[in-house]
Image (cartoon, helix red, strand yellow):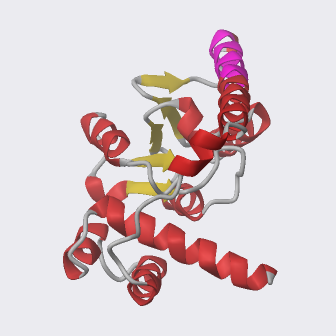
Amino acid sequence: MRVGYARVSTIEQDAERQVARLLDLGVPEDRIYSDVGFSGAKMTRTGLDNALAAVREGDTFVVPALDRLARNTEGALEVIRRLTDAGVIFQNGTTPYDPKDPMAKLFFTILAAVAEAEGGWISLRTREAMARPKVRAKLKGRRPKLTERQDENIAKHMAAGDLAVAEIAQMFNTSRTGVYRAQARHQARSAQKVGE
């Protein structure tokens, strides 16, 4: 069995391209887990946790690119180590990881370090851009199509796992990505209420 994982950092971004890539790599649609609005630096994510819980010995855990799994070397290597210990094959795009091959281990360590550095560069460029008043003025964003109540109901269905993502999308007249965005908005609101 193949299990896929996709991630985008902000709710404005779209995971559909990554999902399409995972489908091309042979991952069944109902075995693709996503996180929307989560930084790759944070390793506690609902979608990632669910994806890791879904794999069993002999399965293959697939990501479209290593930076979708993690933006820090330590986090990426920890997940790969955990999968390897469980007898799960890790696949980055079309490349499977062989833990017995020292060159493969070196390659993935370098790749993870590059992903971490790239995350730092993106963060630096974002902070530099945000320092300009013109950029800040443009970042008002558009209002979501779904209400807070609908976001909450979608999050409940996602947590319960009683419906497929496509079914939830149809029920609320939105896209699969819209479902993930609604879930992320609800989680962000819940976290904000806890912090208050």
Q: Nearer the viewer, residue 59 or 120?
A: 120
- Relative image position of residue 100 (x, y in whole percent): 65, 21
Q: Quadrant of residue 150?
A: bottom left
Q: Nearer the viewer, residue 113 or 90?
A: 113
Q: Quadrant of residue 149?
A: bottom left
Q: Quadrant of the C terminus?
A: bottom right
The vertical placement of 194 against 20, above or below, is below
* Magenta stretch encompasses residue 113: yes
Q: Residue at x 44, y 57 (%)?
A: 33
Residue 13, horizontal then vertical, whole percent: 43, 48
User: Residue 32's spot in the image, x, y percent?
Assistant: 38, 54
Extreme top residue here?
103
**Magenta stretch containing residue 89, yes or no?**
no
Secondary structure mostly seen in magenta is helix
Image quadrant in which you'd find residue 154: bottom left
Report the magenta residues as a range: 103-114
